[in-house]
Image (spheres, rainbow, N blue to C red):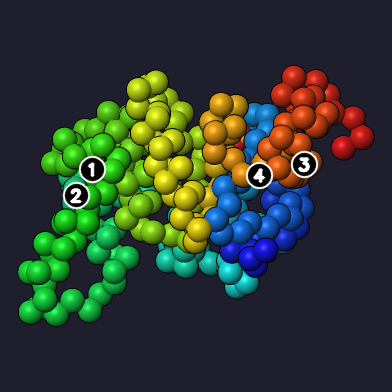
């Protein structure tokens, strides 16, 4: 088994007296898509926020490829390879869809463009950005201002920006929420493509069971901020703890 690309170690955050994420230890590996499930308020999004750096941990660690990134801010974590879909939305709402994607491609490729190579590189950046928009079915909106995009297209743009970033860790928090039935399959198809990359580590918070069944290699269950189950989908779905959590009944002895 490959070594973990991402790991949280006893990761904890308290909001006042409430422990929203409680000593969660979990390791993720490249080539694996992990679905993160649990009832509303279980701490899934908060765990994501701790991993991507939106909020600071009360205690515990976040390790990326063996490096402790717990004290890094959001931008430094993104640079290190943490790719969180939503934080990239509306990067530049007054620029077009294509310009936004091109900026992320450019940022990824880094500085060092000489004046001589600039023109050719510009074409190159545009070509890559156009290719990404094609993959997310946003080509027809390429010249729209981001702030004018309908909701479903904004969600597609989030995935486009993530593809442009080529992170080591892909994090999706209910990526098809609010999307129409004909738009959602585009996003799910792209997540399936990303998952096919053996170098990609994918974390997917999802409530929809059909999506989990289709994509997950592994399921982690959070309940009241605590990791209560972790294993292959068939086992976890059949476990009492998941059955009870999803039935909304009290879980005893957890
Ligand atoms: N910034 C905050 N300040 C105070 N409490 C917070 C904050 N963020 C989250 N919480 C609380 O932490 C708990 C976990 O919330 P979180 O949003 O992580 O749940 P979730 O599992 O993502 O739920 P959902 O499935 O509804 O998205 C909730 O009780 C929530 O009210
Ligand atoms: Mg949430």
Q: Are marks 1 and 2 in contact (CB under 8 Å)?
A: yes
Q: Above or below — where is 7 with respect to 242?
A: below
Q: Residue at x 29, y 72 (%)?
A: 110
Q: x, y (%) of residue 252?
A: 90, 30
Q: Above or below — where is 48 with respect to 183?
A: below
Residue 218 circle label = 4
Q: Residue at x 21, y 33 (%)?
A: 148
Residue 229 circle label = 3
Q: Are marks 2 and 4 in contact (CB under 8 Å)?
A: no
The image quarter in which residue 128 lies: bottom left
Please name whichever residue, 153 or 194, is drawn nearer the observer in this view of the structure. 194
| Distance CA(mark 2)–CA(mark 4) | 33 Å
Q: Are marks 1 and 4 in contact (CB under 8 Å)?
A: no
Please name whichever residue, 57 or 88, is drawn nearer the observer in this view of the structure. 88
Label 2 sits on a secondary structure element that is helix
| Distance CA(mark 1)–CA(mark 2) | 6 Å
Tell which circle, 1 or 4, labels the residue nearer the N-terminal end.
Answer: 1
Q: x, y (%) of residue 35?
A: 61, 41
In the image: residue 86, left or right of residue 153: right
Q: Above or below — where is 179 with respect to 101?
A: above
Tell which circle, 2 or 4, labels the residue nearer the N-terminal end.
Answer: 2
Tell which circle, 4 or 3, labels the residue nearer the N-terminal end.
Answer: 4
Label 1 sits on a secondary structure element that is helix
Is the residue indicated by label 1 positioned so its CB lies within 8 Å of ligand 2?
no
In the image: residue 119, left or right of residue 150: left
Q: Of circles 4 and 3, which is in front? A: 4
Determine which residue is flagged by label 1: 134
Q: Residue at x 26, y 37 (%)?
A: 137
Determine which residue is flagged by label 2: 130
| Distance CA(mark 1)–CA(mark 3) | 38 Å
Is the residue indicated by label 4 positioned so its CB lies within 8 Å of ligand 1?
no
């Amino acid at each position: 088994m490959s070594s973990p690309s991402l790991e949280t170690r006893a990761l904890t955050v308290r909001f006042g007296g409430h422990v929203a994420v409680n000593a969660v230890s979990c390791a993720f590996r490249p080539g694996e898509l992990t679905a993160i499930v649990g009832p509303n308020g279980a701490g899934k999004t908060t765990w994501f926020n701790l991993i991507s750096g939106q909020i600071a941990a009360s205690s515990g660690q976040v390790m990326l490829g063996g490096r402790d990134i717990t004290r890094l801010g959001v931008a430094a974590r993104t640079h290190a390879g943490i790719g969180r879909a939503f934080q990239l939305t509306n990067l530049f709402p007054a620029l077009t869809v294509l310009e936004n994607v091109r900026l992320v491609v450019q940022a990824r490729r880094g500085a060092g463009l000489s004046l001589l190579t600039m023109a050719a590189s510009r074409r190159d950046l545009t070509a890559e950005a156009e290719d990404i928009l094609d993959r997310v079915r946003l080509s027809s909106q390429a010249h729209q201002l981001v702030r004018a995009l309908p909701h479903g297209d904004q969600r597609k743009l989030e995935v486009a920006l993530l593809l442009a970033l080529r992170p080591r860790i892909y994090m999706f928090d209910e990526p098809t929420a609010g999307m129409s039935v004909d738009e959602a399959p585009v996003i799910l198809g792209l997540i399936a493509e990303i998952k096919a990359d053996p170098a990609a580590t994918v974390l997917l918070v999802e409530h929809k069971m059909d999506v989990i069944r289709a994509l997950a290699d592994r399921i982690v269950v959070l309940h009241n901020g605590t990791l209560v189950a972790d294993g292959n989908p068939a086992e976890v779905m059949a476990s009492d703890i998941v059955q009870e959590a999803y039935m909304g009944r009290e879980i005893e002895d957890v």
